[in-house]
Image (cartoon, rainbow, N blue to C red):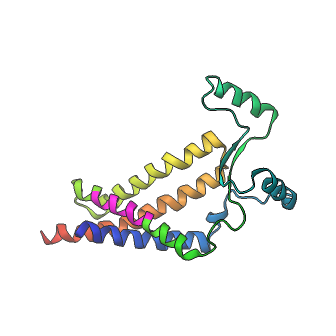
Amino acid sequence: MRIFVAGLLGAIAMFIWTSIAHVATPLATAGFKQIPNEAPVLSAMQSSIGDHAGLYIYPWVDPKDPNAMGKSMALMKTNPSGIMIYHPANSRNGSMGPLLAAEFVKEFIQALIAAWIVSLVAVATYFGRVAVVTAIGVSGTLMTNFSYHVWYGFPANYMLAQFIVDIVGAFVAGLAIAWWLGRAIRTS
């Protein structure tokens, strides 16, 4: 039960931080730009892709092709390249409630895992426990965001903003988790 409570407190702290980061700072929009002359681009996407939601990469090379990497590199020399998440009109729920709930559940799972790991390691100090949770956050954000930058060309300012959001999120979760789990150490 103490790990569950620590995870819940960590998730609440992380959720508060990520809410602040996305509402009150420029971190949420770092690296994003509007498509110039957007209307004809959206029209062309709708005409070409239609109702087929998905994650698209261009230029496309069949990944089963044994020469896929070479062909992809050659195509990128003469064609634009990128990835795009496409959702047809009216295909997503426009309500923030389910999205915020899903985000909180994700953060609760992260904090629960971090609390479990902290409970397994022999770290007696408060800031030592905070450091363990923060290190988990650093590892997680490097695992995804740096690779997105390297392989897909995500902008550096996007990657750095995500590092800040994720690492500070892990740190504040660590503050709550370390406090709660430290109570058991003090009462032992």
Residue found at the far left of this picture: 188
Residue found at x 65% / y 27%: 68
Residue found at x 23% / y 69%: 2
**Nearest the eye: 4 or 30:** 4
Residue found at x 87% / y 57%: 40
**Nearest the eye: 77 or 188:** 77
Examine the rendered structure and indicate whether residue 187 appears above or below residue 115.
Answer: below
Image quadrant where residue 110 sits: bottom left
**Nearest the eye: 144 or 126:** 144
Image quadrant holding the N terminus, namely: bottom left
Locate residue 107 relative to residue 44 in the image: left or right: left
Query: In the image, residue 66 lies at what x, y percent?
Result: 61, 23
Q: Which residues are magenta?
A: 106-116
Locate residue 34 relative to residue 109 in the image: left or right: right
Residue found at the far top of this picture: 66
Query: In the image, residue 43 lies at what x, y percent?
Result: 84, 58
Query: In the image, residue 41 lies at what x, y percent?
Result: 83, 55
Residue 43 lies in the magenta stretch: no
Report whether residue 179 is seen.
no
- Total numbered labels: 0
Image quadrant holding the C terminus, namely: bottom left
Report whether residue 173 is seen.
yes
Image quadrant where residue 152 sits: top right
**Nearest the eye: 126 or 65:** 65
- Decide whether the magenta segment is chiefly helix, strand or loop: helix
Query: In the image, residue 57 lies at what x, y percent?
Result: 68, 43
Locate residue 29 relative to residue 120 in the image: left or right: right
Examine the rendered structure and indicate whether residue 181 appears above or below residue 85.
Answer: below
Residue 112 lies in the magenta stretch: yes
Residue found at x 35% / y 71%: 8
Examine the rendered structure and indicate whether residue 62 appears above or below residue 20.
Answer: above
